[in-house]
Amino acid sequence: MLLRMFGVVLVSSLLLSCGGGGGGSANSGGSSTTGGTTTGSGTTGSNGTSSGPVCTAGFMGSSKLMVGAQMADATAAAAPFDARYLYLAGGIRPAGTCASSCSSSCNNWWGCWQDQSLPPGQYALWHMKNAASASWQSAAHPQVPVFTYYEILNSSGAGEGAGKVAAIDDAALLTRYLDDWRFLLQTIGNSRAMLHVEPDFWGFVRQVNSDPHQVSAAVKAANATDCAAQENSATGLARCMIAMVRKYAPNATVGLHASPWNYTVAGDGAATGAYMLALGAADGDFVVTDPSDRDAGYYTSIGQNRWWTDTTAAAYLAWSKTVSDTVGKPTAMWQIPLGNMAQNNTTNHWQDNRVDYLFAHLTDVAKSGIVALLFGAGETQQTSPETDGSNLIRQTTTNWQAGGTALCQ
């Protein structure tokens, strides 16, 4: 998983396998919309029920399927991209420091990924400013800034899996974590943004217990100001984080992450959707999924078959649609590998077929309840928008020139 680029410094070793890469199998178990318009027969509520399929007529001000990526400035300006994402990771703010100014002790905290003479938060502000001022062919073409908030792993010091799930019951850690989340939301303020909450984490919660109400979290002690009414569970934490978005960043949209580790298993779409409902995903605006954390060619090089076939690609779209219909919210497909068959299966030039498949099946994508395709390398050795031979730029431009792909097919 790529983390960030600030100046000439690339930090990536902190994130080695977030999103879709394995995670093992997950056990199955049992609103407010801001910045988007959803129409159709499906309705959802905070009681965790859904009444059927939802047709998303517009999302983040767009009636078309959004295309975006994690990318460099030059790439972002080279095609009519609709969104641009980055990670906030590396650890939450150090205890007792960095509240109003940056120093060397704050280097791993996203709030100080900037000129340290400036007050904390400039990195996020710059991201929003650059997205808002984006243009295409000399005309304004604002992009939606997307933040992937991935902080529990590195803040807790625990490994992937049950260890970091247990960390949310540490009141001192969770207090700092939710304070950091609040700082991000206050930094966003009234600006528009998409917030993607903790990829993989909720899937690991599901592995611990298929009922997220039964996974303990010190929510009330950690944030009595905003979340005293929430229960002390993983569900309470998820709903607390969503409620904080409504309070501090009212024009932002927010979505939890649904891990598709068993998407080829019959019935997993419905089971995942039911789990996300129990977690509180219906209180959000969308659900995020990820098809793989590495290029298929890379996985071939280490003896694993992660290629999409027509059958598995259709299964992923069907799984996504079932999750969307069950939760009553659209999905965003995120961190989609960027390889293509013109690559030579070397570092940063791995082959994959997901980009070309998706752009050849955009109507099917929209019919599956997907409102955004967000491409990005899951790790620094993978193919990126800067190393894919301009394939993503060409595909995005061609789609835009053809009028884009309408949502609510």
Image (cartoon, rainbow, N blue to C red):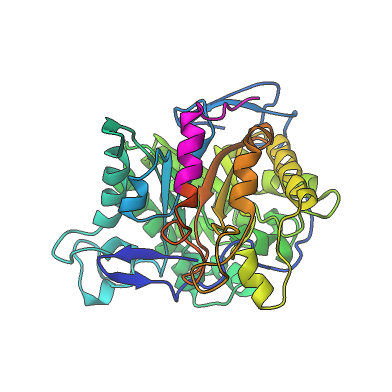
Furthest residue to the top?
40
Q: Residue at x 66, y 31 (%)?
A: 44
Q: Residue at x 66, y 56 (%)?
A: 259
Q: Nearer the viewer, residue 85 or 125?
A: 85
> From which residue to which does the magenta span run?
393-409
Q: Residue at x 56, y 60 (%)?
A: 342
x, y percent for residue 263 = 76, 53
Q: Within the image, what quadrant is residue 201 found in?
A: bottom right
- Residue 227 visible, this orientation: no
Furthest residue to the right?
266
x, y percent for residue 191 = 32, 37
Q: Nearer the viewer, residue 263 or 284?
A: 263
- Residue 180 visible, this orientation: yes
x, y percent for residue 332 = 57, 43
Asked if 4 appears above or below 333 in the picture, the reply is below
Quadrant where the C terminus sits is: top right
**Left or right of residue 250: residue 187:** left
Asked if 143 appears above or below 343 in the picture, the reply is above
75 falls in the magenta region: no
**Left or right of residue 282: residue 179:** left
Query: In this figure, what is the number of numbered marks?
Result: 0
**Left or right of residue 236: residue 11:** left
404 falls in the magenta region: yes
Q: Nearer the viewer, residue 393 or 72?
A: 393
Q: Nearer the viewer, residue 46 or 314?
A: 314
x, y percent for residue 15 = 49, 71
